[in-house]
Amino acid sequence: MDSSASYAEDLQVDAELAALEADMPGLQARAGDVFALATAWAERHDAILAATPSASLDQVQAKLRRMGIRWGMMPGPRMTGQFPILRTPDASDAA
């Protein structure tokens, strides 16, 4: 396969990943229960992997894993940012 065809396939897969990310709220809203949601996720997940060129498979699997963790579809640690408490200046700071 030439590089232009591979590039076009990579663009198509990126578009499918973006569409899945954008549709996740809709998937959750349309799913009647957790099993329907899991089935919808698995179908989209598998379709994206099937369309992925073998050279990009590891990267796409990692993207799908991160997306799945973010949406609660796959086990894994979620990152939440913690911000330190901002102190309010008081009279003793002025000295």
Image (cartoon, rainbow, N blue to C red):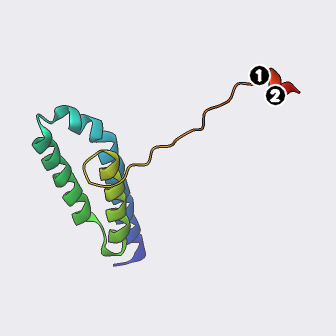
Q: Residue at x 14, y 41 (%)?
A: 34
> Marks 2 and 1: in contact by CB < 8 Å?
yes
Where is residue 77 drawn, in percent x and y? Answer: 36, 53
Q: Which residue is mark 1?
A: 90
User: From the image, which quarter does the C terminus lie in?
Assistant: top right
Mark 2, Cα crowd under 10 Å, few <14 / some 14-19 / many 20+, is few
Q: Which residue is farthest top?
A: 91
Viewer-proximal residue among 7 and 89? 89
Above or below residue 41? Residue 95 is above
What's the amino acid at mark 2? Asp
- Cα distance in 3D space between marks 1 and 2: 6 Å
Where is residue 35 drawn, in percent x and y? Answer: 10, 44
What's the amino acid at mark 1? Asp
Helix, strand or loop status at disc 2: helix
Q: Which residue is mark 2?
A: 93
Helix, strand or loop status at disc 1: loop
**For residue 13, side relative to residue 45 (left or right):** right
Q: Residue at x 27, y 54 (%)?
A: 75
